[in-house]
Image (cartoon, grey):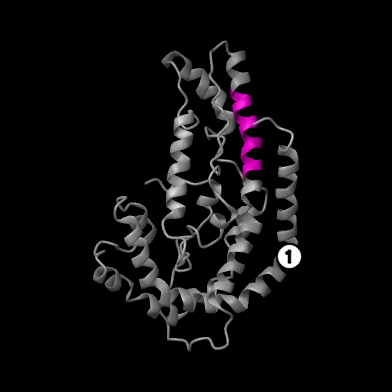
């Protein structure tokens, strides 16, 4: 199953949890579900809603595919422009939170395999449309490659987000305390033995890779086992993150406002374009 996703899918990072002296549990913390919702909302505000990502994608479609068609015409070569198909056709805003595919201990414990299935279906839909690999006669390939060079040889659905999104999406500094939190590391330590006890002896160190490559008949059980085995570390990590969220947002308020404005401009610019 593919793990390809829109630029944002390349914006995620792996949370490294390093062992250190154990810390005491957090008392009086807000409910884990509320912290997860706040973190998901913050990530959507940075990396865009479904509407906003589709707007960026549509603008990029007209830029890239329109540019390729014009260039190939100028070169006297035939070119079949693929129809616009959105990567995000089946997505909802709920699918775009931090917990859906972050690849960290803070991955959602309720989303199950839906993020992976959405990504696989989206890529297959784009492949069938001709957007992934263009149908070209061998004699037309050199002209196409030359025409595609100004676009970095990237497909239109690989659209760049507004300036500042990549930097903010790392949530720099928010998770630093977790990397030195021995209690979180200790809570995650039994994960592999727990997974083995549930019939998943080969999970290894790369959870996302293991989960994303389960056969169709095993994927539900694998995600259920992952959620159960990771939950102690997940809940503790959420409790650690909760008190820092408000301060992080306050410290990045200007950047968040700028990114929000940029996303809304993309929506306005894309609204009159044909689909």
Residue at x 47%, y 36% (from the top left corner): 125
67 part of magenta stretch = yes
Residue at x 42%, y 86% (from the top left corner): 21
Kind of element beneath mark 1: helix
Give percent across and percent down for residue 50.
61, 49
Q: Range of the magenta residues?
A: 54-68
Residue at x 75%, y 45% (from the top left corner): 265
Image-based side of 106 in relation to 200, left or right: right
Give percent across and percent down for residue 134.
47, 25
- Between 226 and 17, the residue placed more toward the observer is 226
The majority secondary structure of the magenta stretch comes to: helix
Q: Quadrant of the C terminus?
A: top right
User: In the picture, residue 247 is in which quadrant?
Assistant: bottom right
User: In the picture, residue 229 is in which quadrant?
Assistant: bottom left
Q: Is the residue 161 above or below the residue 182 in the image?
A: above
Q: Is the residue 123 above or below the residue 84 in the image?
A: below
Residue at x 51%, y 57% (from the top left corner): 12
251 part of magenta stretch = no
Q: Which residue is mark 1?
A: 253
């Amino acid at each position: 199953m593919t793990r390809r996703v829109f630029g944002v899918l390349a914006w995620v990072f792996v949370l490294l949890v390093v062992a250190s002296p154990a810390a005491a549990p957090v008392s009086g913390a807000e409910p884990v579900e509320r912290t997860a919702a706040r973190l998901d909302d913050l990530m959507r505000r940075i990396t865009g809603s479904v509407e906003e990502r589709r707007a960026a994608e549509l603008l990029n479609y007209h830029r890239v595919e329109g540019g390729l068609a014009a260039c190939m015409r100028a070169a006297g070569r035939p070119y079949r422009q693929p129809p616009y198909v959105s990567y995000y056709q089946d997505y909802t805003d709920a699918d775009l939170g931090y917990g859906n595919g972050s690849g960290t201990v803070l991955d959602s414990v309720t989303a199950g395999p839906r993020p992976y299935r959405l990504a696989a279906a989206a890529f297959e839909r784009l492949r069938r449309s001709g957007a992934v690999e263009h149908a070209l006669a061998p004699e037309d390939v050199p002209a196409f490659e030359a025409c595609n060079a100004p676009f970095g040889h990237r497909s239109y659905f690989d659209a760049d987000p507004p300036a500042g999104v990549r930097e903010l999406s790392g949530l720099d500094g928010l998770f630093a305390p977790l990397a030195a939190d021995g209690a979180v590391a200790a809570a995650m330590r039994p994960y592999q033995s727990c997974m083995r006890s549930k019939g998943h002896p080969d999970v290894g160190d790369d959870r996302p890779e293991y989960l994303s490559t389960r056969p169709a008949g095993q994927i539900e059980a694998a995600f259920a086992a992952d959620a159960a085995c990771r939950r102690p570390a997940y809940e503790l990590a959420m409790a650690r993150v909760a008190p820092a969220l408000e301060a992080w947002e306050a410290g990045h308020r200007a950047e968040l406002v700028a990114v929000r404005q940029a996303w809304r401009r993309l929506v306005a610019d894309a609204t009159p374009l044909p689909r």
